[in-house]
Image (tube, helix red, strand yellow):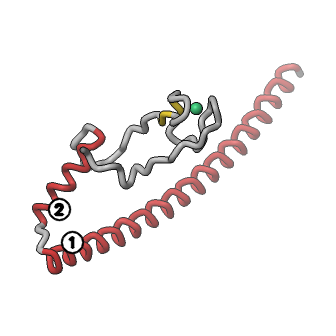
């Protein structure tokens, strides 16, 4: 009798585990489909950006005589701004200095954490050219 109760319990637990596993598999499938859609959208964006870059490069060449080599040189210069020639530009955000109290603040702060003075937010896309 005790053995039967024990076995029934094990069967119920196994059924419950199977239901949980089915749900987990369904969730994983949904996540996969969502990721596939995101990848597809990113691929389309890359293709669109590639087209835009080709158009810009051709306009620069045709209207201003800027060569592909000059563009490559500039690419390399910008790539190196984050300290690594790796085909990526990932600037390391530096802390902002408060113009009033000179204390360091997180780069995304619009006002000083310590005194409340407004801090100008720097653009990483268009950094100050090197002096
Ligand atoms: Zn301050």
Kindly state the secondary structure of the residue where label 2 is placed.
helix
- Picture quarter with the N terminus: top right
* Label 1–label 2 contact, CB within 8 A: yes
User: Reading the chain from its start, which is encountered first: label 1 or label 2?
Assistant: 1
Label 1, residues with CA under 10 Å away: few <14, some 14-19, many ≥20: some
Distance from Cα at disc 1 to Cα at disc 2? 8 Å
Give the percent coordinates (x, y) of residue 89: 32, 48
Q: Nearer the viewer, residue 68 or 25?
A: 68
Q: Residue at x 58, y 50 (%)?
A: 28
Left/right of residue 92 with respect to residue 64 in the rendered view: right
Q: Is residue 61 above or below residue 113?
A: below
Q: Residue at x 71, y 38 (%)?
A: 17
- Would you name the residue on which mark 2 appears? 71
- Picture quarter with the C terminus: top left
Give the percent coordinates (x, y) of residue 13: 76, 33
Give the percent coordinates (x, y) of residue 2: 87, 19
Q: Nearer the viewer, residue 82 or 116?
A: 116
Q: Residue at x 36, y 42 (%)?
A: 91
Q: Residue at x 59, y 43 (%)?
A: 118
User: Most extreme residue toward the front, as rendered?
Assistant: 100
Label 2, residues with CA under 10 Å away: few <14, some 14-19, many ≥20: some
Give the percent coordinates (x, y) of residue 8: 82, 31
Kindly state the secondary structure of the residue where label 1 is placed.
helix
Left/right of residue 93 with respect to residue 118 in the rendered view: left
- Would you name the residue on which mark 1 appears? 57
């Amino acid at each position: 009798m005790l053995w039967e109760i024990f076995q029934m319990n094990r069967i119920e637990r196994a059924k419950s585990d199977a239901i949980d596993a089915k749900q987990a598999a369904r969730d994983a499938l949904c996540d996969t489909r969502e990721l596939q859609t995101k990848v597809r959208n990113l691929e389309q964006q890359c293709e669109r950006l590639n087209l835009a870059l080709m158009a810009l490069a051709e306009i620069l060449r045709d209207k201003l005589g800027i060569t592909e080599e000059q563009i490559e040189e500039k690419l390399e210069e910008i790539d190196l701004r984050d300290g690594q020639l790796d085909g990526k530009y990932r600037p390391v955000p530096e802390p902002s200095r408060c113009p009033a109290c000179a204390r360091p603040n997180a780069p995304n702060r619009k006002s000083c954490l310590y005194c409340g003075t407004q801090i100008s937010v720097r653009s990483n896309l268009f950094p100050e050219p090197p002096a």
